Image (cartoon, rainbow, N blue to C red):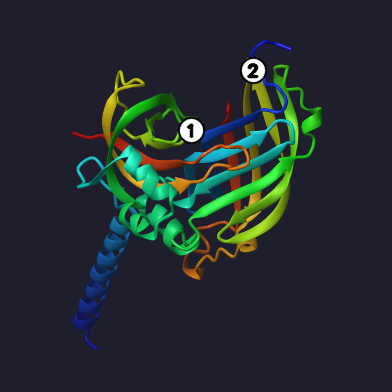
Amino acid sequence: MSRKVKRYILLLLIIIITIIALIGYQVWNKPHQDIKNAVAAKTNAIELYNSLSNDSANTKAFFINKIVAVSGEVKQVSKNQQNQQVILLKTNIADGSVNCTMEENIKNVKAGDMVLLKGICIGYIGGDNDMQLPGDVFLVRCYPSD
Amino acid sequence: MAANSPIKGQVYFTKNGSISFFSKTILQNIQADNNEVISILNLQTGALQFSLLNTAFHFPKAKMEEDFNENYMESDKYPRSTFKGSIANIDKIDFSKDGTWQANVTGDLMIHGVTKNITTSGKIIIKDGKISAAASFKILLEDYHIKIPSIVSNKISENIEINIDCNYEKK
């Protein structure tokens, strides 16, 4: 094999390795899903809570791990340990809420306000029947929506 | 007893407790936070439970989050992780006084569909009548049948440190 051919093979190998490394780097560093500008399935807090707390397979497939825009009345506004804003939306169950962890805070929001929030619906976590504590439906990485 | 101090027999809970895990490896540190943890604590019996959805763990990198749910935790098949147990020395904790108390916790930890009995210690902190709990312990991935593909086994530690931080409110 001539020196010229060897040089071409080496160059080709370097190009292939560089391309693989670049693809690997891009996959490893791909950004999180853009919730703010994503299209969302629309629902309201009462409907979402009732659907998911009843454990129906159809509604689970429709909402869980999907981007959902939920309208509802604010029950409580607080902060979690990471200092993220947490907004609870009222349902027709006294201690059960649609529990939304915000990625972008809403200024001056308070109990009684009507809001539309968009985030990833991760599902329902049950509370404890013996202690009469119902669970919540959780949305994470939420943004205010128009 | 102060007017705003917790009273025995009452149930305390949080629906936004925090559980994070940390794994230090040669190539990189892996950390993820879950701030959507339901925890319920019964002051009279010492019964303590935690429940979370695995998909709520948020990682700095999207690819890590994807691998965690699809390859390691199989979150479609096993969406929840839970702990059901009790604080064995609940009688020794004086909920009427501000302070930090050691809590000896024992119970069943269910991760990836596998349940193991664990015993660990944590802290109950009482400040201005408010109760919080903190704990840190390690688990072995193989105990919960979480398989790490050999191609990335040098990036992921077999020991994962779990940190718990919950601020409770009265039911």
Q: Are marks 2 and 1 on the same chain?
A: no
- At label 2, the amino acid type is Gly
Residue A27 vertical position relative to residue B96 in the rendered view, above or below: below
Q: Nearer the viewer, mark 2 or mark 1?
A: 1
**What numbered label is drawn on residue B129?**
2
Left or right position of B163 against A58 = right
Near mark 2 (Cα within 10 A), the count class, few <14, some 14-19 or many ≥20, is: some
Q: CA distance from mark 2 to mark 1?
A: 22 Å
Q: Are the residues flagged by discs 2 and 1 in contact, CB closer than 8 Å?
A: no
**Which quadrant of the figure contains the N terminus of chain A?**
bottom left
Choose between B30 and A49: the one closer to the eye: A49
Q: To which chain does the residue with label 2 belong?
A: B
| Label 1 sits on residue | A95
The residue positioned 60% from the left and 59% from the top of the image is: B141
Residue A41 vertical position relative to residue A12 in the rendered view, above or below: above
Pinpoint residue B63: horizontal percent, then vertical percent: 37, 55
Pinpoint residue A117: horizontal percent, then vertical percent: 28, 35
